[in-house]
Amino acid sequence: MARTRAAPAPPYSRKLLKPRQRPALTPHHTARRDADGRPARKPTSLTAGEVAAGVAPHARDIQRCYRDEIGEARGANHLELTLVIAYDGRVRSATVAVPRLAARTTRRMAACMRTALATARFPERRSDTMAILPYYFQKTEAPDAGPQLSCWNRSGCP
């Protein structure tokens, strides 16, 4: 069997090529750089201050969920809210633990808190963060407690 030779490559053309266009700068190129000139890496997980700042706008909703579900139960004044915050800053899961409270009530409270925290956003990180947030509630039944009528007139009150 006769072997065939491959045809030689054509000689390079001498015409001028257009210079390559540089790509537009992306956020990766404009990111902060460390001392060596490499892009700075995101921290691994959130700090306690960042978690507290992200949850703070939703504190009233958390309290409302607790009060709505707790009812007249006694001794259930401690709540542990466990959040798993995804690397992209959204809440991946929220679970609730309340000692001395029925499991059904705890599940309803957790569902309410998940909807309350659905819009919570945190800074992006390289990995997920798990945070346990303790809440302590105190129910007081003091006589004459609550809003009091008052007068702030310099001349005196009628």
Image (tube, helix red, strand yellow):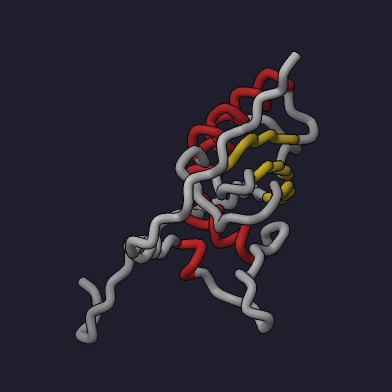
Q: Is residue 95 above or below residue 127?
A: above
Q: Quarter of the image holding residue 73? A: top right
Residue at the image position 53 percent from the left and 36 percent from the top: 65
Image vertical order of residue 40 relative to residue 78, above or below: below
Side (left or right) of 22 relative to 151: right
Q: Is residue 24 left or right of residue 98?
A: left
| Rendered-image quadrant of the C terminus | bottom left
Residue furthest to the top: 1
Q: Residue furthest front?
A: 2
Question: Residue, x 68% and y 50% (percent of image)?
Answer: 135
Near-viewer residue (82 or 36):
36
Q: Position of residue 149 (x, y in %)?
A: 33, 62
* Rendering coords of residue 76 (x, y %): 72, 37
In depth, the one of 101 and 23 nearer the eye is: 23
Residue appearing at x 62%, y 78% in the figure: 37
* Count of labels in the image: 0
Estimate the x, y position of residue 18 in percent, counting from the top left: 32, 62
Q: Quadrant of the N terminus?
A: top right
Q: Residue at x 69, y 35 (%)?
A: 96
The residue lying furthest to the right in this view is 99
Q: Nearer the viewer, residue 49 or 73?
A: 49
Along the viewing direction, whichever of 29 and 59 lies nearer the viewer: 29
